[in-house]
Amino acid sequence: MPGSDPLFLKVDDFDVDGAVREAFERMPQHTRAGFLGRTVSAGAAALGAVAVSPALASAKPYSSDITILNFALSLEYLQASFYTEAEQIGALRGALAHQAHVVGMHERAHVKAFKQLLGPAAIKEPTFNFHGVTENPDAFRSTAVAFEDLATAAYKEQAPLIKSKSYLAGALAIHSVEARHAAWIRRLAGFLPAAHAFDDPLSDAKVVQIVNSTHFVTLKDPQTSMEAKPKFTG
Amino acid sequence: MIHFWVDYVGPFSDRRPKLAKGGVPRIESVDEGRGALVARVSRARLFKGSVAVVGALAGAAVGGAELAASAASGGSAATDREILTYGLLIERLQAAFYAAALAGGQLTGEARQFAQVVGAEERAHVKYLSAALGASAGASPHFNFGDSATDPAKFIATAISLEETGLGVYNGQAVSLTPKTLAAAARIVSVEARHAAWARALAGKDPAPVAVDVPIPVAQAKQTFEPFIVQ
């Protein structure tokens, strides 16, 4: 929404039907039974968590695991895009700019790892419009706190549902990094980094609902959507 | 504020204590463990959408099995108990460390606040895991931290070491837990990660130094913990 108050959202400018939800709902269609046999080792190595046994590398992936990894990839796309854009715009200074730089690198690494792990089953990156929150330090801080606490809660909910030990180890290794990110930005935002003795999980449905409510996700597949536009020839 | 933020405040509003003026956050009350682990993890909703998690885990090949405290793998009540027992030792040690640090009276400012907040959370973890383990929790060993807890410079360095090691152990062991117990333990693990991040920030280090947290084997963790345990 160029030229307007960056903190003002006009709902009808955006995809109110929720591109994120659509993207998430499409996930099971991307399941490709068997394709992961050759990528488990490399993917797990990218996640940096475990030494994968030969027995595991030949194991069949579970379709429910693919769904969960794609859900995680969606959240990582969102975060990586957010920090990358904030860094490129350059409105942040000092400790906040450093946080965006380092955390952005982490989120991009997570995206890369999940894409590598999922191979052709990886969902496509949607396009994002952060509506100015990447240009305003206060809005950036608030949004980053929200994203990181949300990601931590989302991973926490999904982890016990992961069937593959290798994927689980990878997800856990990222789960605690998201919690570190949350603590980091909370401190910079003036909140207690660890406000409670126990962190609660958050269901995938609730996570999607919250992400959708931001209208940060504008198109799930920009090229397809452009091509799909009707042509008016006169 | 943006639409996102209004929505966000709902589920997480109780997690956003404001900093007091001067940059030192107020201490907010720390929630206690809400019932025994066994009660909490029995919630049916944890299994929403999952068909055969337990069956899939039984007999699964375990990546990183060498990290497990137990030779048994695939998840069992006995393995859960073994891992939680070690988790309880870590929490007892951490709680004692922060208590000793505060008793020393030399911490000021945010370091003191860190010890107060984190110490209370570690005590809540002790209470929670003790309740989960019941009689087999046993008595706590005694600890002696010397000036590692009371000297302000050593306090931060030791806090980083204890928190990072505790987190690394949890991350290494969690893959061997049954899904039910994992769901419960994960609520503690991310809090330990927050503690580690906060401690690092107090030392002027990046709170999150790498993109993935590497698990720490128990044998390695013992080298960190055992010097503080009085035999």
Image: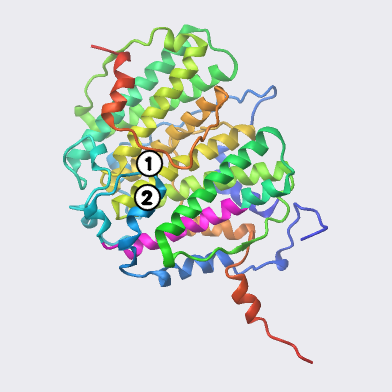
The quarter of the rendered structure image containing the C terminus of chain B is top left
Specify the amino acid type for callout 1: Ala
Mark 2 — residue?
A159
Name the subunit of mark 2: A
Name the subunit of mark 1: B
- The residues colored magenta run A60-81
Using a 10 Å C-alpha cutoff, classify the residue at mark 1 as few (fewer than 14 neighbours), some (14 to 19) or many (20 or more): many
For the residue labelled by badge 1, is the local secondary structure a helix, a strand or a loop? helix
Mark 1 — residue?
B186
Where does the image place residue B21, in percent across and percent down from the top left? 70, 24
- Please state if B228 lies on the left or on the right of A110 as rendered: left
Tell me what residue is drawn at x 58 percent, y 64 percent: A126
Residue A211 sits in which quadrant? bottom right
Residue A203 visible: no
Residue B85 image label: none
Where does the image place residue A102, in percent across and percent down from the top left? 58, 40
Q: Nearer the viewer, residue B11 or A117?
A: A117
Tell me what residue is drawn at x 23 percent, y 53 percent: A54
- With respect to residue A114, does B207 lie above or below? above
Residue A57 sits in which quadrant? bottom left
In reply to whether residue A76 is colored magenta, the answer given is yes
Where does the image place residue B203, in percent across and percent down from the top left? 54, 22
Residue B99 visible: yes
Residue that sits furthest to the right in the current view: A3
